[in-house]
Image: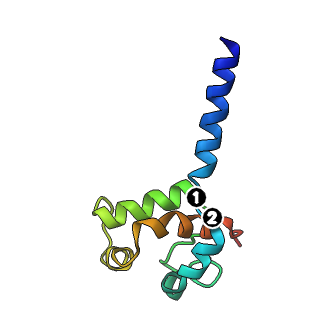
Amino acid sequence: MTRVLLAAALFALSAAAAAGGNAQAGKAKAGACVGCHGANGQGAGPIPALAGKSEEELLRALKDYKSGKRTNATMKNAVGQVKDADMPNLAAYFASLKKK
């Protein structure tokens, strides 16, 4: 029984790790984001920083803007141009940046 539980736990951990995005691929797609959020994701004034946030938080925000769950006309338009497959990569890229 212990082996089964251990195997299940290892499988769950590996599946979670595999679900993460690719930061390098995200960097290649981040051009539109840096126009407002800055080259290092630091934000400015009313534009929030992306650097230092978790990958999960960033991915949820992207999905929520795209679905309309979160409302902001600029973000709805910007995220509307992002392919769903690119969202985890963008989240991974900005999560990899250090908050200043």
Q: Is residue 12 left or right of residue 69?
A: right
Amino acid type shown at disc 2: Ala
Residue 92 bears which disc, if any? none
Look at the picture and state if 66 lies above or below 40. Answer: above
Residue 95 bears which disc, if any? 2
Residue at 71% across, 73% down: 100
- Marks 1 and 2, how far apart at CA: 5 Å
Secondary structure found at label 2: helix
- Sequence order check: which comes first, mark 1 or mark 2? 1
Look at the picture and state if 100 lies above or below 63. Answer: below
Amino acid type shown at disc 1: Glu
Query: Which residue occupies the foreground of this view, 3 or 66?
Result: 3
- Say how many tags the image has: 2
Secondary structure found at label 1: helix
Q: Which residue is the extreme one toward the top? A: 1
Which corner quadrant of the image does residue 44 belong to?
Answer: bottom right
Q: Position of residue 52 (x, y in %)?
A: 65, 64
Query: Which residue occupies the foreground of this view, 19 or 69?
Result: 19
- Whether residue 44 is visible here, answered yes or no, is no
Residue at 63% across, 48% down: 17
The residue pinned by badge 1 equals 55
Which corner quadrant of the image does residue 5 belong to?
Answer: top right
Look at the picture and state if 14 lies above or below 78. Answer: above
